[in-house]
Each structure stands twice: as C-alpha cells, then as structure tokens.
Image (spheres, rainbow, N blue to C red):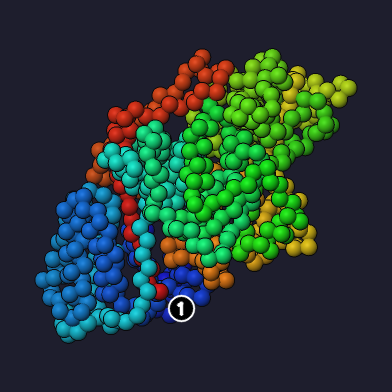
Amino acid sequence: MSQVVFSTWGGEFIDNRGKSSEEWGQSAFKLPETYTADRRSKAFIGWDGVAIFQEDVDAVRLATEYAAQYQVYSEACGRCAPGRWGGRILYDLLDKIARGEGTHEDVAHLREVSQTMMLTSKCEIGKTVPKPILDLMEHYKEEFETCINSKKPSKHYGQEIDYIAKVTAPCTDMCPAHVDIPAYIEGVRDMLFGDSLAATRQTMPLAHTCGRVCPHPCEDACRRTNLDEPIAIMELKRLGADYETDHSMGWFHPYQPKPLRNDGKKVAIIGAGPAGLTAAYYLALEGIQVDIFEELPVLGGEVAVGVPEYRMPIDKYNKDIELVTSMEAVTVYTNHRVDAERLKEIDAEYDATLLAFGTRLSKKVYAENERADMEGYWGAIAMLDKVNLWSKYGIGSPASNELAGKTVVCVGGGFTSMDVVRCSVREGAKKVYMLYRRDEKTIIANTTYEEYHEAVEEGVEFIFYSAVERIYDEDNKLTKLLVNKFELVPDPNGGRAQLVKIEGGDIEIDCDYLIPAVSQAADLQILPKDWNLELTSWNTLLTNGKDYMTSRPGLFAAGDCEYGPMTIVNAVGQAKRAASVIGRYIYEGKVSLTDDEIMEDHLQKLKVYNKKEKITGWMPGIARANSEKLGVDERIDNNKEVNLGFTGEEALAEAERCMRCYYISMVAV
C-alpha cells in the first residue's frame, strides 16, 4: 500500500487532490514514495502509469523529463521509426510547452504521435512510454493549458530537481544478477556474439556457468509466456561465452579494465566460489587490488567440487575462472585456510574484507539413530567432493569404489540432492532413491523441469511425501531405513494444507548408503568470537540485504554465508552489489548505493512482470526451441555434458522470439 496524491498505476485510478486526509484512498502497489530513508519521492512515472506523492509537482516538467530519458534510449536504439523519431518528437513538443512556447496544436500533435507509437513501435518501450504522458496530459490538463495560454514556463521549469531513471525488463528484474537479457539475446539474433557476451558481463561474469546451471527464474517472468512459451533465456546466454573460448578470442569485458591503481588500497576476499570470483572481477575492472584466499586446492567453490561434470564441464567453468584470475589486479592463494586468527590479521591488513565462503556442512535429517560415524552415512557435500575431485582433477579416488552395485537413498529436494542421485547412477549404484517431503511440482520448482525429468529417465526413483524416521545398523554399518509416508490434508479454514502422517503407511528400504542433502550450513568457526558479529536466525551473517556490510565496519558478506545455500545467480547478484559498495567504501569510508541500485530495489518491490497481462500485436504459437540432449544410454555411465546446446539455426530462431520488453521508469526526488 502506498500513500499517493494521484495515481493511474496498474490501471487503478486514485485522485486525492482537494480531499481531506480521512478521505484519501491508497494505492494497492508498492510504489517508491520514499526514495531513500532521508529522501521522499515527489513522483514516479513509468510503463504502467504515473503516481504523484506530493501536491506541489510540476506535471508538465515531469512528462518532459520522462520523454527526455526515453529520447536518450531511442537515439541509441533506432530499430524502428516510430520509436526513434517518436521519442524525439515527444521530447521536443513537451519541452516546447514546458518552456512556455507551446500551442494547442502541439498538444494535438502529441496525442497523435503517442497513439502511433503505441500501435506501431516494434518493442515494448516505444509502446509504453506514451501512456503515462497521456495520463498527465488528461488529468493535469490545466497545468499544460496554463503554460500554453500564459506563454510562461511550467512552475518548476529550470529548478534543481533530481529525475532518476532506470531501464529494465521483466526478465532482467526477476534475474538476481539483473542481467541485461534482451541485450544479450539481441546480440545472438544479430550474430554479434561478442556484443552478447559483453552485455551479459555487465552484471554476470560467469557466463559459461550460468548459461548451463542457472535455474533461470528470468524465464518465469518472460512476457512471451503470456502468449505461448518462455524464451530459452539461459541457453542463449552460453552462446556468447562459447563463441569467445571456442574461437580463442580475447576477453569480452563490459568495458576496458582500468589499470591497477597502486594507491595502497586493497580488498581481501575469503572464498573463490561464484560470489568471491564475481566480486573480484568487478573490483578488478575498477583497478582495485584484490587478494582471494581459498581453502580448497582448486578454484571455483561448490560449482567446482559440487556440481557434476555432466552439468557443468570443468573446462568451461575454468574459462570463467580464468577471466577473473587473468585480471592484473587479482591475486589468488589456494590451500589457504582462514581461521579466526587469520581473519583478524587480514582485517587489519586490508581496507575491506568480503566473506564469500560457502555452506559446506551437510545438515542432518533428524532421524532416530542418526550418527555421522556410521558406515554408509555419507554427507552430500563430502560425497560430491569425492566424485568431482576425482572426475575433474584426478584428486583422490573414484566414488565408484564405494557406490558400484550399492543401493543409495538420498533425502532432499533441491539441486544438491539431484546432483547426488544422478552422480550415484553414474558411479554404478544398483538402485537410487530420493525421498522428499513434498510433491513432484515442488521439486521441479526447487530445481528445474529438465533436472527432474532427466533424473527420472536415468532410473532414479522418487518417493514423495516421505521422511526417514529411523536408521538401522548392524555393528555400526547402515542396513535399512524406516520411512514414514504422509498425505497432504487441506485446511478446512482455508489455510495452508498440512502434511499428516499416514498411520500404518510406513515402509522399510534396505540400503547401503544414506546421503542427507536436505540443506547445508556455514562453518562459522572462521569468525572471531570477540567480534560479536550479528547472525540471522539461520546462523548466517546478518547484513541489511542491500549493501552487504556486516555489523563490523569494513567486513562484508555475500553468497551462502550471508543468506544460506543459494543458487549461483543469487550469489553473483549479491557479490556484484557488494563489490560496487566496497569500491566506494574504501575511498569514502561509508556505505552507499548508486541511484541505479536504489531503483533496482524499488522495482523489485513493485514487480515489473504482470502474469495477468493480455499481450496483443505479437503472433502467438511460435514453438520454443529445444536443444539436443544426450540420450540416456549415452550418458548414464559417464560424465559427458548432457545438454549440448543450440545449433546456430536454433539459436537464431529462438532469439527471434524475444519481444525486447524494455521499460523505462523514473522517480522525481
């Protein structure tokens, strides 16, 4: 709910002008009425309408400034005449009126051009920009007429007012790393793969990785879904990265990296997983010295030692890692365990420290007789370490020594559990089960449709609505499990349905291994006790979730240790923001966000994607391209990459489906 003077946002109409406070209606949307804690917004204008928060707003100048922002965009785009020339005409006519030189014919011309743009622009930004301008012209008509009739500038014309704009898209807004998705898809469509990759790396350096193992929440916000099927956004991302490495190109950075500053400022990063690598990359682009300390003998964190080769080939991930480590400003120290005393030393030596270590402690399933020292009880992290250190680096020994011919039960319902069961199949297990407390729909939501169905194809048996009650052993060797079965019982009062144990429904499963993959925890022994760092109820480092500084000045946290186990793209998004904040903090001594980051947060609250939107003007029924996958017989006993990616023709066809759904929003402060 938002307090507004006037609003047409999202189809609502609220007009509180001239009413007493008791009569005021409130907006149903989370509009940015407060820009920052100490700055109130005057107005917000964007693709879906306009909202006025203060009575004394210059509606004519607001419309003019919005048109100015669009003109900058449309001049750079230029893909259609209505969008490009319409943007120029909108601004020219509105500015003419705002400075007191307009006529009533100009108003009529504005309406005509706006209608033409809304009907004929090729992309969404050209179609939507006129809407709030027309709203202002209709409902603040007297302000426009005053400028025209009196031949005087609008009331705030020329005054110092901040107008802060941001271009976004529904898919970009939903992406935790806020990748400019339409731009990289456009690069694929135009066969400018370097441009595609540079667009991705504006906010996502790990393009090989997130082009393969991202859960792609962006696809849930693809407006194409409202017509037929979402675009294969994730798979199109890998095109630019594969082009760079397959053709031995130089690195495509979003901009030319700045030279190492050599000013004595330096940042320490603890952990070389996705969060640590991302933060290092964006700090290094600015020429800031970064030292990464990694406990493992290899770089890459859990993606390296946890995500299997068949999903994420290590040679591809190593290219993402090399992108970072090749930067002049980055130095890496492997086999370097940081404990509490070492962290104190680092804290004293560096201008800022980012904690980016993962959650590598497997949690229990909390069954009777559960003991970590029982033979056959194997934590998911330890199991995947063994699989991947051998298959990727030749370190240790094959996990098939333990799993071949055995029966394996995994408890979980996320990516880690999927990796466990599918790796168990490849290591020669005779039978593989996954127990999950919820249903098939939920496990797909937790992972992806592809992951679940590929596991089923490979012979994994899923037992839903189940949980382990007791573990049986003989001479400390696991022998079988007692498993409870549940049913989902609706709440008669309309609340959330509850899982209720089915009396007499218990089953026993004879097995050799139980691998809990219900969740992971962070090893917080690294934190000095006398620092008294604030923690969350989940026993992770507490930050405000915006600038990622902990309760200790100069100590930041991002990724799993800040939030708990998260996806790669979430860790990247946090680390990109943290690097931005740290880059300013070490020079200014205070934390701050850029206007772009502040607007990101506002738009996420507001929600850019409208799943109820009815889309017209596009031809529906264009099938989504499906990339080739290795058949079950070709993949079941090896670590070959399963998803082979698009052919060139498939990629171009899929990129053509993108509707380029950019939107502009702007706040007056």
Question: Who is closer to the viewer here, 130 or 486?
Answer: 130
User: Residue 132 occupies which quadrant of the picture?
Assistant: bottom left
Residue type of the residue flagged with mark 1: Ser
Q: Specify the farthest residue to the left.
A: 105
In the picture provided, is 382 more to the left or to the right than 5? right
User: Residue 369 occupies which quadrant of the picture?
Assistant: top right
- What x and y, as percent, mark residue 231? 37, 38
Q: Residue at x 40, y 49 (%)?
A: 253
Question: Who is closer to the viewer here, 464 or 600?
Answer: 600
Q: Residue at x 37, y 48 (%)?
A: 199
Q: Specify the farthest residue to the right.
A: 475
Q: Residue at x 37, y 39 (%)?
A: 249
- What x and y, as percent, mark residue 120? 18, 50
Mark 1 crowdedness (10 Å alpha carbons): few <14, some 14-19, many ≥20: few
- Residue named by callout 1: 21
Placement of 72 over or under 612, stated as above or below: below
Q: Residue at x 77, y 28 (%)?
A: 377
Question: Who is closer to the viewer here, 298 or 366?
Answer: 298
Question: Who is closer to the viewer here, 579 or 111?
Answer: 579
